[in-house]
Amino acid sequence: AQKVTQAQTEISVVEKEDVTLDCVYETRDTTYYLFWYKQPPSGELVFLIRRNSFDEQNEISGRYSWNFQKSTSSFNFTITASQVVDSAVYFCALNGNTDKLIFGTGTRLQVFP
Amino acid sequence: DTEVTQTPKHLVMGMTNKKSLKCEQHMGHRAMYWYKQKAKKPPELMFVYSYEKLSINESVPSRFSPECPNSSLLNLHLHALQPEDSALYLCASSQVRRGAVAEQFFGPGTRLTVL
């Protein structure tokens, strides 16, 4: 069975704070893919990153960074110097080489000015 | 063009109405998806089309009928819906990669209300 757990339901920070969103996954597949999506209040899911199970390199894209650790089955997402525009629901998702994305329950991030 | 478009943005329908949701992409993607998302929940997969053929139906009630007329278009025909079907309906598309999984790109969704 495949499962994604985002234990943080809601996080509130003040602008310029750093914030980390946790994602823990379960799968028996040896090849799998992990994703992060952002869903702002407008509703559209915005793709942020895709990572396959063989690539454990951390990635940085501007203020965003991702830490993939197979040993702990985690794929955490950090926003540095948060901004109000980062306010959204963030979903972590898993795909075990099928057409099905398994989403976590999401973390609502609120960034206050 | 890296966009998935959906029409209409909002739809209100009665339980006896027949309506359709439309989705279009021009990224050359050959996989297209319908998801249903209730408030404060993650998206739930409904249907997957691969090369214009239905490849996954997640046991969706027959009052939802998908159609993929060509590689750029995806429709969802609605008939005799129930109030509990009110939700945000999201369309997505992705490349089909042999031996790998591509990221899905989502449209803005249709917010459906069934009265």
Image (tube, helix red, strand yellow):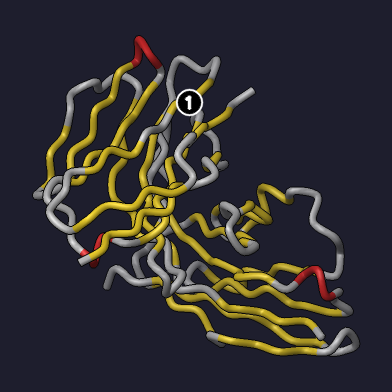
In the image, taking residue B12 as reference, residue B26 lies left or right, namely left
In the displayed image of the protein, which residue is found farthest to the top? A71
Disc 1 residue type (three-letter): Tyr
Quadrant the C terminus of chain A occupies? bottom left
Mark 1: few, some, or many residues within 10 Å (few <14, many ≥20)? many
Which residue is tagged 1?
Answer: A25
In the displayed image of the protein, which residue is found farthest to the left? A62
Q: Residue at x 63, y 75 (%)?
A: B75
Q: Secondary structure at mark 1?
A: strand
Q: Can residue B62 be spotted in the picture?
A: yes
In-front residue for pair B3/B112: B112
Q: Is residue B27 above or below residue B45?
A: below
Q: Residue at x 36, y 44 (%)?
A: A36
Q: Is residue B83 above or below residue A92?
A: below
In-front residue for pair A17/B2: A17
Disc 1: host chain = A
Q: Can residue B34 be spotted in the picture?
A: no
Q: Quadrant of residue B43?
A: bottom right
**In the image, residue A56 lies at what x, y percent?**
24, 20
**In the image, residue A3 lies at what x, y percent?**
57, 29
**In the image, residue A24 lies at what x, y percent?**
44, 26
**In the image, residue A54 lies at what x, y percent?**
30, 19
Q: Quadrant of residue A105?
A: top right
In the image, taking residue B48 as reference, residue B13 lies left or right, namely right
Q: Residue at x 34, y 66 (%)?
A: B27
Q: Is residue A24 above or below residue A63?
A: above
